[in-house]
Amino acid sequence: MNRPLLNRVRHSLSAALVLFTISVIGYMWLEQFSFADALYMTVITLSTVGFGEIQPLSPAGRIFTAGIIVVGVILIAVLFGTLTEYIIAGELGGTLKTRRLMKKMRAINNHYIVCGMGRVGEHVAVELQNRGLPCVVIDKEKATIEHAEQLGLTAIQGDATIDETLQDAGIEKAKGLVAALNTDAENLFVILSARKLNPDLTIVGRSTMDEATPKLQMAGADRVVSPYDMAGHRIVSQLTRPHVTFFLDSALYNKGLNLFIDEIQIAPQSPLVSQSMSEAEIRSRTGANIISILRGDEHEVMEWSPELAIQPGDMLIVVGKLDQLHALADLAGDTRFQQD
């Protein structure tokens, strides 16, 4: 939005209101008009419609009226010129668009924010969209925002390193954030701000240099990803384990197979708590298969055995059909999974 032009419109409207007020007060003081007569005289004077005076004016009143007409004509010309420029420049449409966006942002909840619509950010946003997950994109460039909107994404033009921009994106209500700006320094600022504004947010940062990874983690990132490392691992996997890669892709991204890999957390109120793996009979009760169990803040991989007792907070890595995963999520009490 062109703020200088918008400010000019506001200043012109304010000046018109001030002139209108001065005119009403002036007629009441100089000519002893009632408020209604002073208001009527002000309207016909500023509009220059040529109606006759309510009563003959005093010399001071005539000079005052002449001054109101001169100043009013100039002010109205400036006001209409500024409004015309405002409309032609597309600012009115931009303001309405901004209002619609803010209305949409007030309604959105439990969403993901992608900071930076570069090559990495665009793939992240599109993948979230394909999974039906609410997503908001932030980027500085107008052309990039227009491209995001063409893809059907909710997009905000602004600097993601500024708290106000993150607040416009509803960070207090967000579920996760991806810092995928061009530099590690920018991502560091985003992560610091995001963690301060929403301590419970899941944050994934993108790094371009290995030495940046611990700094981004110290700033508050839950995970730090290097696209170059991931690309290298991916290429090697395609070379050496193509069938494993195919299965994981199919399960993770629903490409061909009716199977999904997901994570389900055990809630404290779940009936599975304190049961052993053999007692829980998860496979027979839900049809889902447990691949691994992660425990604690350090995500310790538990060694599976029939006697392994299930604890609150355990993260089950599972594979199965969608209805089977939902059945297990109900049993585990994981409402977080159901929101996805």
Image (tube, rainbow, N blue to C red):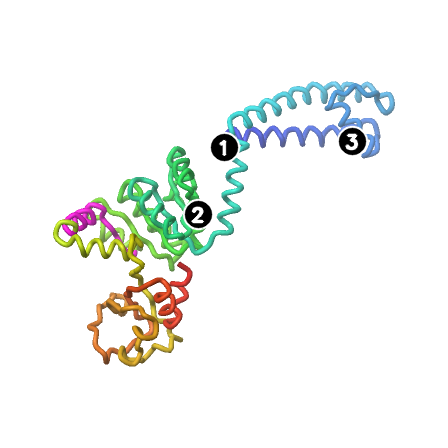
Q: Nearer the viewer, mark 1 or mark 3?
A: 1
Q: Residue at x 42, y 51 (%)?
A: 134
Q: CA distance from mark 1 to mark 2?
A: 20 Å
Can I make out residue 29 in this image?
no
Q: Which residues are magenta?
A: 222-237
Point out which mark residue 169 bears: 2
The vertical placement of 32 against 212, above or below, is: above
**Splitting the image into 4 quarters, where does residue 153 fall?**
top left
Q: Amino acid at mark 1?
A: Arg
* Residue 3 circle label: 1
**Alpha carbon of mark 2 to alpha carbon of mark 3: how far?**
45 Å
Image height of 99 relative to 204, above or below: above
Q: Secondary structure at mark 3?
A: helix
Q: Which residue is mark 3?
A: 39
First of labels 2, 3 by sequence position: 3
SS assignment at label 2: loop
Look at the image and say whether residue 338 sits in the magenta stretch.
no
